[in-house]
Image: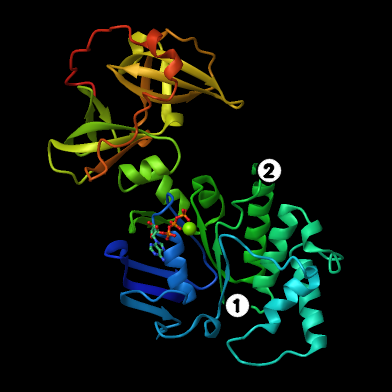
Amino acid sequence: MTKELIRLSDCKVAFDGDVVLDNINLYINDKEFLTLLGPSGCGKTTTLRIIGGFLKPDSGDVFFDGARINDVPPHKRLVNTIFQKYALFTHLNVFENVAFGLRVARPDDKKIDKHEISHRVIEMLEVVSLKGFEKRDVSSLSGGQQQRVAIARALVNKPKVLLLDEPLGALDMRLRKDMQNELKQIQQSTGITFVYVTHDQEEALAMSDTVVVMEGGVIQQIGTPEDIYNEPKNAFVADFIGESNIVDGIMRSDGVVEIFGRKFKCLDSGFEPMEPVDVVIRPEDIDIVSPGKGKLTGTITGITFRGVMYDIIVDFHGFKWLIQTTDLCQVGTEIGIQIDPDGIHIMKKSRFSGMYGDYSSYSAEYDDIGDAEHEYEPEDEDEA
Ligand SMILES: Nc1ncnc2c1ncn2[C@@H]1O[C@H](COP(=O)(O)OP(=O)(O)OP(=O)(O)O)[C@@H](O)[C@H]1O
Ligand SMILES: [Mg+2]
């Protein structure tokens, strides 16, 4: 059963008149892995600082387990933080770094005896796979091991909630992936609520139960990773999460959208007749067919080998799309495309319309080949 643990209600923060968080409304359930995702400067750390009690919102309320905690200081909250730059004590060994978490001021003001400290530290080092490292100098550890010490230190006094601010930012890709899995396992085995901050969308999709997409101090969308990927609310979210072609469309009727003068079947409904919309088409949802058989015809202007598949850039009437395919293609070839109805997602126009989703600059080196003219196809009224 899900139980709400934290709620931010209409939280606003401004620094020197600049609004940094604008009416943030968010709840976090007990045992949830929730990720704040967004570009640099969008307000992720500021949101985390409000939850941790390091910053009071200018207006709005923070609730923990139903009680208003605006005025509760950080050490009285059942929350621990791993900061963006996790600071380990380089003059202390692994054991003492972790034990520090038990010796600092605690929510219950209780002192913990030596025996208990030792027991809990060893237990935590086991959780983060660092058993036997107790006496090691932290400066002698690898980046990933240091990160695990920071996690053990934050977990050792059993917080209800752990706030993690880009904890894997300093690690290389491979280690990052390993640590993502480990963190997820630790979260599940301990049952601690994680509020995780990252600007890496892949990381957010892979780890989270819930993703909160932020931009400019505003929450753009909250949902499961699948929701956010498959049903982005606007062009910002569609562009930020994964690769997307975003083109102008017109809703002709429920289930029919017009793109470049051609009608496509889709699963979306509830728009005004002839409403201008943003259409998202993911690169993996486009089928390549022979030019005569496609709904649209374009010319391949760039190809990048990605291992599992090729990224190809295709010019449709001057607008460049990214298509992912396992077929071997050649630059300069004309292709047709088909898109199944469930490969098309319709979004309302927003202030982000027209800002994202064009791949013109993606493979600039092939641009000169791709400028070949081709005929605009006549509209086929009854095809959709
Ligand atoms: N103490 C402060 N005084 C003035 N401006 C601040 C302060 N703290 C944050 N800001 C501003 O608020 C905005 C949001 O900052 P925040 O640290 O929350 O971003 P972020 O999403 O965590 O970014 P990053 O991914 O770069 O860490 C930024 O424009 C930042 O410059
Ligand atoms: Mg930050």
Q: Position of residue 292 (x, y in %)?
A: 33, 9
Q: Earlier in the sequence, mark 1 or mark 2?
A: 1
Q: Residues within 10 Å of mark 1 (few under 14, many from 20)?
A: some
**Ligand 1: which quarter?**
bottom left
Q: Position of residue 333 (x, y in %)?
A: 42, 7
C-alpha distance separating marks 1 and 2: 29 Å
Residue 313: quadrant of the picture: top left
Can I make out residue 319 in this image? yes
Q: Quadrant of the C terminus?
A: top left
The residue under the point 57% across, 26% down is 306
Q: Residues within 10 Å of mark 2 (few under 14, many from 20)?
A: few
Kindly indicate whether the residue at mark 2 contacts the one at mark 1 (C-beta within 8 angstroms).
no
The residue under the point 53% across, 17% down is 327
The one nearer the camera, 80 or 225, is: 80
The one nearer the camera, 343 or 116, is: 116
Q: Position of residue 151 (x, y in %)?
A: 67, 66
Give the amino acid type for the residue marked by disc 1 in the picture: Pro
Mark 2, ligand 1, within 8 Å: the answer is no
Q: Is residue 350 left or right of residue 52?
A: left
Note whether 356 is above or below 104 in the view shown.
above
Can I make out residue 2 in this image? no
Note whether 259 is above or below 108 in the view shown.
above
* Residue topped by disc 2: 174
The one nearer the camera, 22 or 210, is: 22
SS for dot 1:
loop
Give the amino acid type for the residue marked by disc 2 in the picture: Arg
Q: Is residue 132 left or right of residue 123?
A: right
* Residue topped by disc 1: 159
SS for dot 2:
helix
